[in-house]
Image (tube, rainbow, N blue to C red):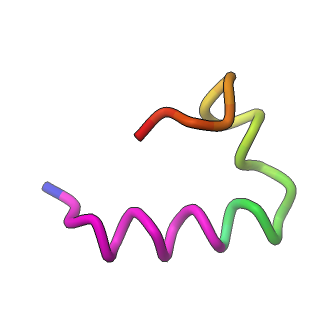
Amino acid sequence: MATRAEWAERAERWERSGLWVSRTGTGSAI
C-alpha cells in the first residue's frame, strides 16, 4: 500500500507529465 509521501511523489510526476487529470478522471482521486 502506498504511503501519502509516495502518493504525493506520484502526483507530482503525473502533473508534470500531464497525466494527473486523465489518470484519476477528476484530478483528485486521493
Main secondary structure found in the magenta portion:
helix
Residue at left offset 77%, top offset 49%:
19
Q: Quadrant of the C terminus?
A: top left
Q: Quadrant of the N terminus?
A: bottom left
Task: Tell me the quarter of the picture where residue 6 sits.
Answer: bottom left
Magenta stretch: give its range: 2-12
* In the image, residue 6 above or below residue 21: below
Position of residue 9 measured from the top left corner of the image (x, y, whole percent): 49, 76
Position of residue 17 measured from the top left corner of the image (x, y, whole percent): 82, 65
Task: Tell me the quarter of the picture where residue 27 sits.
Answer: top right
Residue at left offset 66%, top offset 72%:
13
Position of residue 8 measured from the top left corner of the image (x, y, whole percent): 46, 69
Position of residue 24 measured from the top left corner of the image (x, y, whole percent): 60, 32
Q: Residue furthest right?
A: 18
Q: Nearer the viewer, residue 2 or 28?
A: 28
In the displayed structure image, the side of residue 20 where residue 29 appears, left or right: left
**6 falls in the magenta region:** yes
Residue at left offset 71%, top offset 48%:
20
**9 falls in the magenta region:** yes
In the displayed structure image, the side of residue 4 where residue 26 appears, left or right: right
Q: Residue furthest left?
A: 1
Q: Nearer the viewer, residue 10 or 5?
A: 5
In the displayed structure image, the side of residue 16 where residue 10 appears, left or right: left
Tally of numbered tags? 0
* In the image, residue 16 above or below residue 2: below
